[in-house]
Amino acid sequence: MTKPIIRFEHVSMNYNDSKLILDDISFELEEGKFYTLLGPSGCGKTTILRLIAGFMEPTQGDIYFDGELVNNIPANERQVNTVFQDYALFPHLNVFENVAFGLRIKKVNNKEVTERVLEALKFVSLAGFENREITEMSGGQRQRVAIARAIVNDPKVILLDEPLSALDLKLRSEMQYELRELQQRLGKTFVFVTHDQEEALAMSDEIFVMNEGKIQQSGTPLDIYDEPINRFVADFIGESNIVEGRMVRDYLVEFNGKQFECVDGGVKPNEKVDIIIRPEDLVITTQGAGMIDVEVDTQLFRGVHYELSTYDADGNEWLVHSTKKAEVGETIGLHFDPEDVHVMRLNETEEAFDIRMEAYGGAEDE
Amino acid sequence: MNKSNFRPWYMIPYMIWIAFFVIAPIVLIFYYSFFDITGAFTWTNYVDFFKSTYLILTINSFWYAFLITFFTLLIAYPTAYFITKTKHKQLWLLLVIVPSWINLLLKTYAFIGIMGLHGPINAFITALGFDQQQILFTDFSFVFVAVYIFIPFMILPIFNALDQLNPSYLDAAKDLGASGWTTFRKVIWPLTLNGVKSGVQVVFIPALSLFMITRLIAGNKVITLGTAIEQQFLVTQNWGMGSTIAVFLIIFMFIIMRLTATKEIGGKKHDKVK
């Protein structure tokens, strides 16, 4: 089950000797899992996808596919298929022929082509659409044709390049479920690229958060959400309150002039750290009853919850998500538990972070 | 167009133009085609057209037009392809188009000079120690010059088609296992076919009725429908026969236009269906 299918070893990439797109990337992808490369535009996530697909060669480093070095293997000889951002469905071919494209090139006999194409279309709930023209299909349907065109070739890995970005919100969340379910039924490795953290959290087995050509952090959605390694990850994944603080000793941290219990350790006493508390972990109480007192500045109704922007006496902003309403201008207390306080060391490497988490951070996973 | 804003009288200058310079001449040609050289009404022009001389002429015309179109396409397609791959495509395209701005007659005369017995090509050949060659007034020179003149007209529509081709189609084809040649055959060519058809149209149809190049470069050794019309009108003074050939030429042109009519790819007419 956990056989590595793709391995990057110290891969770097730059275009025309100018800007570094990927900076010494190493990772391993296991068979049958749903991976997401998450990051802002220009972080290099699509470049990784194109390297796996074989559309480009790395400037440095090695890429292994199923144990074999594939640096120089062109895209048309790799057992990888891509679902493109704009789907790239061939407009001169109908749905059937689009899906059959890969099989026809492999000279599969007609009977088998028909069987496999119809099966693939059924898989993406498009049975009966095979004679339609591409222009007659809606955005969501085109998306599914693109997926069918990829899976019909029975590749080992399916790459998806922001395939949901062109869809409207409702369809997008529907497709999230569908994609996840599809991946589990197929049991194939999916590598999904997105800049949408919600998508990443909802679908992935493992997320790689990227920024400026580097993998900032990798882990399960829960790990990354609960224990972001640095400010960037904390900010990018979900909303967060980040304040500067100081580690007093293991399990005790100081910020806002007060000391609070936490579940983190392994940091030198008195080291400067960033503290993150998620807005939904803050519970509104009456003034003085919580850990800190804040004044409500604005309040937005977000549907499921209220979003409160509040300020403490030191002028730090605290974002609060609560189903309870507060009054603007009112001073309220905010309560949080020790496990809600996440401590991030400045400039910690992922390796060191993992070791420290192993030793100290397990409290809430148990 | 919005009906309430539609002003039919804006069309009047255009309508006048069409009436005087398109419809009237065609009607006149059709009318004259029913008279013989003495001015008497006759059907013989049409009967004569199906006699061997004119049929051979027609086949000849089609054959040369085909050759010219074929070689033009053979040169224009790769050229257009490489222009789309260059860094300064608009500049390269301009360089290809610029010669088409120069008067046709001037260019043709230039070729007479270049290909003539005392021209630079023969000078080069004799310098290499070979005998002087008759280049002008051959089939080769005729096709060569015609191809040269038509190339920009073929490159332009093909370039546009190639330039509009979404590069992710090429990635997709490659991703699905297609080699470079297969990608060309199964994706690039069918998606640029409309450009090719337009190019073929703008080359084949004028090539069918060429007479000036036929006259000056081929020295009337190649007789085509165009030269035949000229002969009938100016030399034989048989306007009736000249008109009859012109009528057939017009019919051929319509047939070719139908054959090379471009289709919207992927059934665009259904585009509104969501």
Image: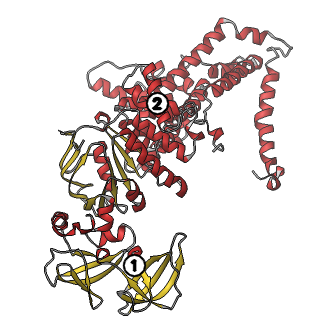
Q: Residues within 10 Å of mark 1 (few under 14, many from 20)?
A: many
As helix, strand or loop, the secondary structure at mark 1 comes to loop
As helix, strand or loop, the secondary structure at mark 2 comes to helix
User: Horizontally, is A262 left or right of B110 in the view?
Assistant: left
Name the amino acid type tagged 2: Glu
Residue displayed at 17% across by 64% down:
A358
Say which label, 2 or 1, has the lower sequence index: 2
Query: Within the image, what quadrant is residue A157 found in?
Result: top left
**Residue closest to the eye, A16 or B34:** A16
User: Horizontally, is A255 left or right of A290 in the view?
Assistant: left
Compared to B130, does A184 lie above or below? below
Residue B267 in sight here:
yes
Name the amino acid type tagged 1: Leu
Query: Within the image, what quadrant is residue B269 found in?
Result: top right
Residue assigned mark 1: A282
Residue A195 point in image, percent of width and height: 39, 60
User: Horizontally, is B209 left or right of B156 in the view?
Assistant: right
Write down the chain letter for disc 1: A
Query: Within the image, what quadrant is residue B32 found in?
Result: top right
Q: In which quarter of the image is the C terminus of chain B?
A: top right
Residue at mark 2 to residue at mark 1: CA–CA distance: 49 Å
Residue displayed at 44% across by 36% down:
A149
Write down the chain letter for disc 2: A
Residue displayed at 47% across by 36% down:
A123
Q: Which residue lies furthest to the left in this view?
A: A268
Residue assigned mark 2: A119
Compared to A188, does A300 lie above or below? below
